[in-house]
Image: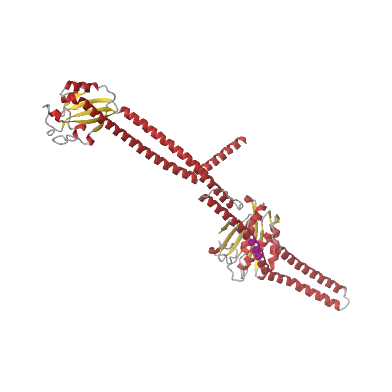
Amino acid sequence: MPATFRCNSKVMKSDSGSTAVRYIYKSLAFKLFCLLLLVGAVVFVSLTALIVRANRQHIMEEIILSAHRTNELLLLSMRQSMLLNRREEVAQTIGALRSGPGIEGIRIYGQEGNIVFSTNVHEVGQKVDLTAEQCIVCHIGEKPLEYIPATAGSRVIASPKGYRVLGVVNPIRNEPACAASNCHPSPSERKILGMLDSQLNLAEVDRNIFTSRKEMIFYSIGAILVIEFFAGFFIARMVHRRVIKLAEGSRAVKSGNLDFSIHLEGNDDIADLAHSFNSIVASLKRAEAENAELSQKMVHVAKMASMGKLAATVAHEINNPLGGILTYTRLISRQMNLGPMTEDQRKGALGHLEAAIREIKRCGNIVNNLLHFSRSSESDMENVDLHNVIERSLAIINHHFQMNNVTTVINLGAGDPGFIGNANQIEQMLIALFMNAVEAMPRGGALTVATWDVPERDAVSVSVADTGRGIPPEIRSNIFEPFFTTKEKGHSIGLGLSIVYGIVLRHGGKIDLKSEPGKGTTFTMTFPRRAKPEKLQKESVLEGPVISHL
C-alpha cells in the first residue's frame, strides 16, 4: 500500500507538472516573451553580421590604403637610386625588406612584364604572365593602360600555407628627370615605366578580425540576454500576473462567486479591463438578487395558477360528498320529525350518520391535501418518501383524471424510495406534470407513473408518461423557459414546466425528456439520495440541470 501511494503521488505530480507546462505554453505572456526573443535575436544577429562585415571591410580598406602608402614611401626611398640607375642600391633596398614583418614578397616589374627586382633573387629576370590576376586589368588590350583603375590596385590571394596574402600594386611613373638621363623615352611617349608589387601577410589581420567578430557576437548575445531578462521581468509583472488575476476572476464568477473582485493598480488597458470586470460582476450580483426575488414571485404566480386549475376539480370533488351528506342529514331529519324512532329506524339513522361522517372525512382529506399543496415550499431538507408523495399527489388530482377520462398506471418499483429533499416541492413538481399530461390528452388517455433505483449514481428516478399529442422537436429546447407556452392566450402563463425545471435543479437532479409527436411524452427525473442543502438554497428556479431531448 505505501508503494502504491508513492506511485500515485508521482503520477499526480507528473500530471500537475504537465498541466503547468501546458498552461505556460498557452499563456499570453509566454507567447509575447517568445515573440520578443525571436525579434530581438533576428535584429541583433542581423545587426551583428552587418557590423562585423562593415568592420572587416573598413579594416581591409585601411590596410590597403596603408599598403599603398607604404609602396609610395618605398618608391620615394628608391627614387634617387632609380634616377641615377643605381641598380645595386635598389636591389639592396628591396633585399633588406625581405625579412620585414608581414612581408611576403616585393617585386618590381619592367615595361615588358619581366621581374627586374625581387626579394626572391631566383625569380629576377623571369617574365610574368600578363593574363595573371594582377596584370590582366592593365594589359587587357594590345597596349597597357596609362592609368591604373582603382580596382586593379589590390588583390587578395590564398597562400599555400593556409593564410591570406594582400597584393598591392603601385605604378612607377615616368618623370622628366628620368627622361633626362636618356635611358627612357619622354613622359609624353610612356606614362608608366614599371610596377611595384608588394605582397603582405594577412594572418595577423585575420586573427584580429576573428577576435573582433567573436567579441561582437559575445556582446550581442549578452545584449539579447540582458534585454530579454528585463523584457521577461516586465512581461511577468505587468502582463502575466495581471492576466492571471483576470483569469482567476473569470473562473470565480463562472463557479458562482459574485463577491470576487480584481484589484489592479495603474491606468493602462489591463487595469481598465479589471475595473470593467468588477462593474460587470457587481451588475450580475444585483441582477441575481433581482432574479431570485422575481423567481420567488414566479413560483408564487405559478402555484396560484395551478391552484386556479385545481379549484374546479376540488369543487367537483367536494360537491359529491357534500351532496351525500345533505341527503343523509335530510333523511335523519325527516325520520326524527315523524316521532319516536323504532330500533330499526334508529339503526338506519346511525348508518346514515356514519355515511355522512365518512363523506365529511373525505372532504377533510381533500381540503387538507389542498392546504398542504398551497403552503410555501421552503428549502428545508428532510427525508422524503417518494412513493408517499406520489400517492398524495395522485389523490389531489384523481378527480381531475376521472373528469378527463384519464386512466392511471402506477408502477412503484424503487426498492428504496427515500432521498434528501423537500416534499412540498416534489409534490408541486408532480402535480404540475400530472396536469400538463392531462392537458396533452384532451380526449383522454393513459398516464403512467413509475419509479426505480439508480444504484450507480446512488439515486432514485421517477417518470411521468402520457399518451398525448407529444411535443414537436422544434420547441423542445424552449419548453422549460419561463412564460413559454403553446396553449391559447389566457389558458396558461407558461410557468409550470419552468417550475419543474427549477425544482429538479435545486435538488441537484437531472431531467430527461422523451417525446414523439402523436405518441406521447415522458418526463424522467433523477434525484440523488444525498443532495447538498447549500446548493438547494442558492440555485435559481430559472436555471436548470443538464437536460437531454430524445
Residue 298: x, y in percent?
Answer: 64, 63
Colour scheme used in the picture?
A: secondary structure
Left or right of 231? Residue 460 is right
Instruction: Compare residues 346 and 400 and report the one nearer the observer.
Output: 400
The reply to whether residue 464 is visible in this rendering is: no
Q: Is residue 112 above or below residue 368?
A: above
Residue located 29% across and 33% down the image: 62
How many numbered circles does the render carry? 0
Residue 306: x, y in percent?
Answer: 66, 66
Q: Which quadrant would residue 511 be assigned to in this image?
A: bottom right
Q: Is residue 188 above or below residue 452?
A: above
Q: Is residue 266 above or below residue 172?
A: below
Instruction: Compare residues 353 and 273 and report the one nearer the observer.
Output: 273
User: Residue 301 colored magenta?
Assistant: yes
Residue located 24% across and 25% down the image: 105
Q: Which quadrant would residue 9 be assigned to in this image?
A: top right
Residue 107: x, y in percent?
Answer: 21, 26
Residue 200: x, y in percent?
Answer: 27, 27
Instruction: Compare residues 151 and 244 and report the one nearer the observer.
Output: 151
Q: Which residues are magenta?
A: 292-302
The reply to whether residue 516 is visible in this rendering is: yes
Q: Which quadrant would residue 399 be assigned to in this image?
A: bottom right
State the quadrant of the C terminus. Answer: bottom right
State the quadrant of the N terminus. Answer: top right
The secondary structure making up most of the magenta span is: helix
Q: Name the residue furthest right.
A: 340
User: Residue 39 colored magenta?
Assistant: no
Left or right of 384? Residue 501 is left
Left or right of 39? Residue 365 is right
